[in-house]
Image (cartoon, grey):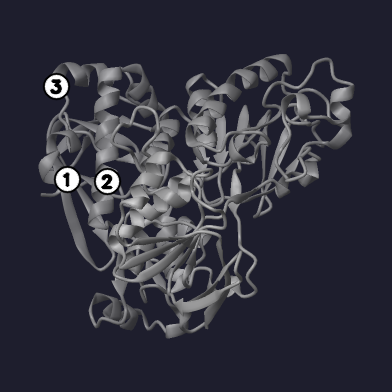
Amino acid sequence: MSLAQTRRDQLFPTLCAVQIAVAQHFATAPPQRFEPGETLYALGERHAPVFIVTSGEVTVTRGHAMGEDQLIAVLPIGGITGEVSQLGGRSALAEARAGVAGCEALRFDTAHLRALIIGSAEIGEIIMRAFLLRRTMLIAEGAGTLLAGRPGEPTLVRLQGFLTRNGHPYSLLDVADGGDGQALVERFGVHDDELPIVLCPNGSLLKHPTNVDLAACLGMTPELDPDRIFDVAVVGAGPAGLATAVYAASEGLSVLVLDTRSFGGQAGASARIENYLGFPTGISGHALAARAFTQAQKFGAEIAIPVNVTALECGGDERQPGDLFTLRLENGMGMQARSVVVASGARYRRIDIENLSLFEGAGVSYWASPVEAKLCEGEEIALVGGGNSAGQAVAFMAPRVKHLHLVVRSDSLDASMSRYLIERIAALPNVTLHTRTEVTALQGDVTSGLTGATFRHRDTGAEWTGPLRHLFLFVGADPNAAWLESCNVDVDANGFICTGQIASGPIWSAAARAPLALETSVPGVFAIGDVRAGSTKRVAAAVGEGAQVVAALHQVLAASPARLPESTA
């Protein structure tokens, strides 16, 4: 049975008269009258309000790029429109119209909606649960966006991964099966070298798009205001960055979160985390991150994805307390903040193989999501790595593949992997552990992708080559801190950011205080999570640092009122 059948009362709750009266105190305006068929908000509309029906009915539909709109629900008195997109001012994934007899409804713009959710715990819980379930339903049904291409083609896999990791619904069409995919290609006259294509719900067609182009077409990225000054800018939307956003925003700070790829960071790609406090049955990294992403928006944090920060401008040695920071974006825009939290995590480490880049996205992957699992069904694969992320990936992939070769350079998994994962892997009949082994070469070409790999035993030097179409690399990560060079933030010998007592710099020598525990060599710039030197590389530890840094932010912001740039007029 579908989600709409099993949890309909939670998907489409109906507020009682008393709850409607409470909600009206938070509404943007008194009940508004809509004539029969009149639009309350349109598909793709940015900053679309949420409505609570006070008389009549509202019909909610979702667009489909290949045909007629599809009915989601008919909402009676007390019904609530909207879903997660409307918490953050993103494009609406559905359309709401007045029923056959018209309707009256209370309007809630984004600010008033957040006020209602926070001001009334009872109603807020009802709305948040409904919003989360509605997004889950839309993802399951593949609402709206169409991807068309050849399964396994690198660009198509990238687009699938981008939408999946950002929790955005889509449907996939195979252009080679003679069905809707081929019909779509013929309808728009698309050539082979223009594949894959994306048909957005608004009818726009994208050919071989970048992630940024796709996000813009779908209205996923909020409209940023370069003149707005935030209390704190967080770079990175992994567990550490999202924790900072949740706690800082809930305590009244204005928060901007920027990430170049998706929410969740590397943890968001974990198939299952079983030792995270409070989840005895385990939870996927994506599900955990998606909840935090929604929670941060509930409290008013502005989250912009995909947005690449290329530099932090902090004024150099002449910087004064209260001076603003500027985060320079890839498009040239500068965002201003009174403080900065660096939560940019780490980049997936690449092994030293001459032609590795040729196969990245064409057989070589750095994470194991449902997208990759689908491509590997029934095949023989190899996975390199001995940490917990590797172990989680093995446990996730093994039931889906013919055989999995786990390759590690060390003597065993004991020193690098949690015991529960080691025991689980040992119980998998189709997993072979190759210790003291490394990958030395890859075979294949641009057209066919990865076709084989060569392995070498580190002690004996024995080599063997076998057919292989999928190789997963979980060999650690390097700190993602190069964008901070313009600000002269101190890093250790391995590139991780120094904080607290080990942070130093010319500014601190003249400062009236010492750096706080998570503060860098630049006052007002903090580092948390995997990018920080000495941090514990665990999700729970990252979340803890994200919460801890908020107290320091309050201390710094209170002591240094913002010094606005002098007018040049």
Per the image, label 2 sits on a secondary structure element best described as helix
User: Does residue 502 lie above or below 202 as drawn?
Assistant: above
Determine the CA span between mark 1 and mark 3: 23 Å
Residue 200 seen in the figure: no
State the mark number for residue 136: 2
Given contact means CB atoms under 8 Å apart, are the residues at marks 2 and 1 in contact? Answer: yes
Quick one: 171 or 457, which is closer to the camera?
A: 457
Quarter in which the C terminus is drawn: top right
Q: Position of residue 410 (x, y in %)?
A: 56, 54
Q: Earlier in the sequence, mark 1 or mark 3?
A: 1
Q: Position of residue 368 (x, y in %)?
A: 41, 57
Q: Nearer the viewer, residue 462 or 493?
A: 462
The part of the image, by quadrant, that contains residue 457 is bottom right
Q: Which dot, 2 or 3, sits closer to the camera?
A: 2
Mark 2 near mark 3, Cβ–Cβ under 8 Å? no
Which residue is depicted at the point 14% across and 38% down?
7
Task: Provide the residue designation for mark 1.
Answer: 3
Q: Image check: 312 left or right of 40? A: right
Answer with mark 2 or mark 1, whichever residue precedes in sequence.
1
Q: Closer to the camera, 257 or 101?
A: 257
As helix, strand or loop, the secondary structure at mark 3 comes to loop
Q: Taking 299 as reference, is 375 left or right?
A: left
Looking at the picture, tell me which residue is in the foreground, 88 or 308: 308
Location of mark 3 (residue): 16
For image coordinates 79% across by 33% down, the residue present is 567
Q: Nearer the viewer, mark 1 or mark 3?
A: 1
Using the numbered discs, state the Cα–Cα distance from disc 2 to disc 3 in whole angstroms. Answer: 25 Å
Q: Residue furthest front?
A: 460
Query: How far apart, in angstroms, are the residues tagged by discs 2 and 1?
Result: 8 Å
